[in-house]
Image (cartoon, rainbow, N blue to C red):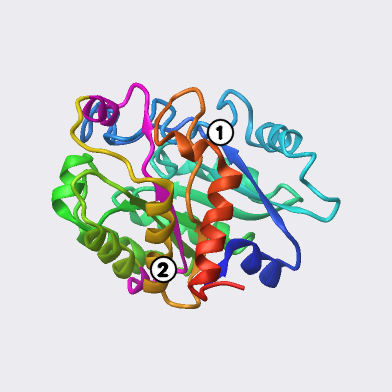
Amino acid sequence: MITLNEYVRNRFGRKLYRVAINGGFTCPNRDGTLGDRGCIFCSGSGSGDFAEDAGFSVREQIERGKARIRSKLPENGGLIAYFQAFTNTYGPVERLRELYFAAADHPEVEVVSIATRPDCLPPEVISLLEEVNRIRPVWVELGLQTIHEKTAEYIRRGYPLAQYDEAVRRLRSIPVDVITHVILGLPGESREEMLETVDYVGKSGVQGIKLQLLHVLRGTDLAADYEQGKFSCMSMEEYAELVADAVECLPTDMVIHRMTGDGSRRDLIAPLWSLDKKRVLNLLNRTLRERGLTR
């Protein structure tokens, strides 16, 4: 397996730190195009709980993000400008151009990373991403979550699997790096079904994957189902074994950008063990070592 830290050190010669940017976007699942309640697990911040305030310019948000991580940021550290909140290709292309180039022009930014949906990549946006990619490497992060249509319908994803495949094909033709988000622990999915999704992603032609632990967040429709006892969350030990199984499914040259995830402490309902991130990562790394999947 290749970790994100290993990958960026080999490619850029130094450690990179992510600063989360809020571009002030919405989402077709929230603005009435496909729905108005969002995906069933999505918080009111559109998964941008740790992004900066959209009222600040991109440059200001980067500087504020740097201040947050100042204690971790060495003198020779670089930045990943991560457009995180909601759907970051969902808007007028000239507005997107303004935001992306503001990030790409920052002297400490090495990568512009853009989180979006496969159904929000029209030809003019693909062309813009190709243009930005000539200045700074662009990573496009696609929220797939699952390949199983019954689960996709339950979580209100709003697009078919074929649209993911087409988005990957078009993005790789530019080419930019593609990172796919997968949620492990979605209600109703068996261990085998979760691993089928991971295996599919590994064979889909993308360069990276984010394995995200399902978080039940206050105020979401998922929280209502959880509180009614419709599903339960995995234990930390079950999750660690599942991640190890997932890593075994993946090509050895795929970059693993994340093995768990952060939920807002204020809003997290379950699983509460995920709040102890150091303990979780220690268990994950120990499990991977025991399986011979990492050094």
Asked whether, in this view, residue 282 is left or right of residue 266, the answer is: right
Tell me if I can see residue 95 in this picture: no
Asked whether, in this view, residue 182 is left or right of residue 267, the answer is: left
> Is label 2 in a helix, a strand or a loop?
loop
Asked whether 210 or 115 is in front, the reply is 210
Tell me if I can see residue 184 in this picture: yes
The amino acid marked with disc number 2 is Val
The amino acid marked with disc number 1 is Phe
Asked whether, in this view, residue 31 is left or right of residue 229, the answer is: right
> Is label 1 in a helix, a strand or a loop?
loop
Residue at 38%, 45% (x, y): give it.
235
Mark 1 and mark 2 lie on one chain; the one further toward the N terminus is: 1
Q: Tell me where residue 187 appears, x and y as whole percent.
A: 23, 43
Residue at 72%, 59% (x, y): give it.
15
Mark 1 or 2: in front is 1
- Residues shaded magenta: 202-227
Residue 291, compared with residue 67, is above or below; it is below
Residue 207 counted in the magenta span: yes
Query: Disc 1 marks which residue?
Result: 50
Residue at 73%, 35% (x, y): give it.
63
**Looking at the rendering, in which quadrant would you find the C terminus?**
bottom right
- CA gap, disc 1 and disc 2: 25 Å
Residue 206, disc: 2
Residue 231 counted in the magenta span: no
Q: Tell me where residue 91 appears, x and y as whole percent.
A: 40, 38
Residue positioned most to the right: 75
Mark 2 Cα within 10 Å, few/some/many (few <14, many 20+)?
Answer: many
Residue 205, disc: none
